[in-house]
Image (cartoon, helix red, strand yellow):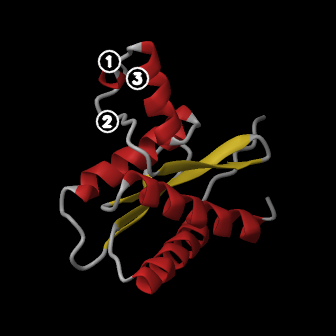
Amino acid sequence: MRQIEELGEKEAALAMATIREELGKRGKVAVLAVVDPHGELLSLLRMDGAPMQSVVVVMNKALTAARERSPTGELGKRFKENGWQMANSDPRFTGWDGGVPVLHGGQVVGAVAVSGLSQEEDAELARLGVAAIMKAIGG
């Protein structure tokens, strides 16, 4: 029998709080998402003033990172270098940076994503959320 670990409400809340705190320090707003290993939503927050279109983008970033087991920016670079189209596999997949998988025990247990800022800042903040989760789960 196979045992599957995955992120839950507690880890999602921790990532959200960590990223929100950092955004507050920077005086910025964004849309945040945490998903399970299948890319299904655990938590979503659109902060006041964050772009509405970033809601769909953040969910796609999180889904892509979880299902493809790779940061979305890295996937985008690989697809571009090889001349591939990401939409050929699943139209929700994206290569925009800002989605980061959470790896624990060699498995993807979920992903964290941020949207609404520059791709670099989105990715930095998502990594911050992942780091908070990893510290809490001992990874």
Tag 3, which secondary structure?
helix
Q: Earlier in the sequence, mark 1 or mark 3?
A: 3
Q: Earlier in the sequence, mark 2 or mark 3?
A: 3
Q: Residues within 10 Å of mark 2 (few under 14, many from 20)?
A: some
State the image coordinates of residue 22 (x, y, percent, origin top left): 50, 79
Residue shown at 19% from the left, 56% from the top = 53
Tag 1, which secondary structure?
helix
C-alpha span from label 2 to label 3: 17 Å
- Residue 88 — which label? 1
**Quadrant occupied by the C terminus:** bottom right
Question: Of residues 4 and 135, which is closer to you in this image?
Answer: 135
Residue shown at 37% from the left, 20% from the top = 89
- Residue 48 — which label? none
Asked which quadrant contains residue 43, the reply is bottom left
Q: Is residue 113 visible?
A: no
Which is more foreground, mark 1 or mark 3? 3
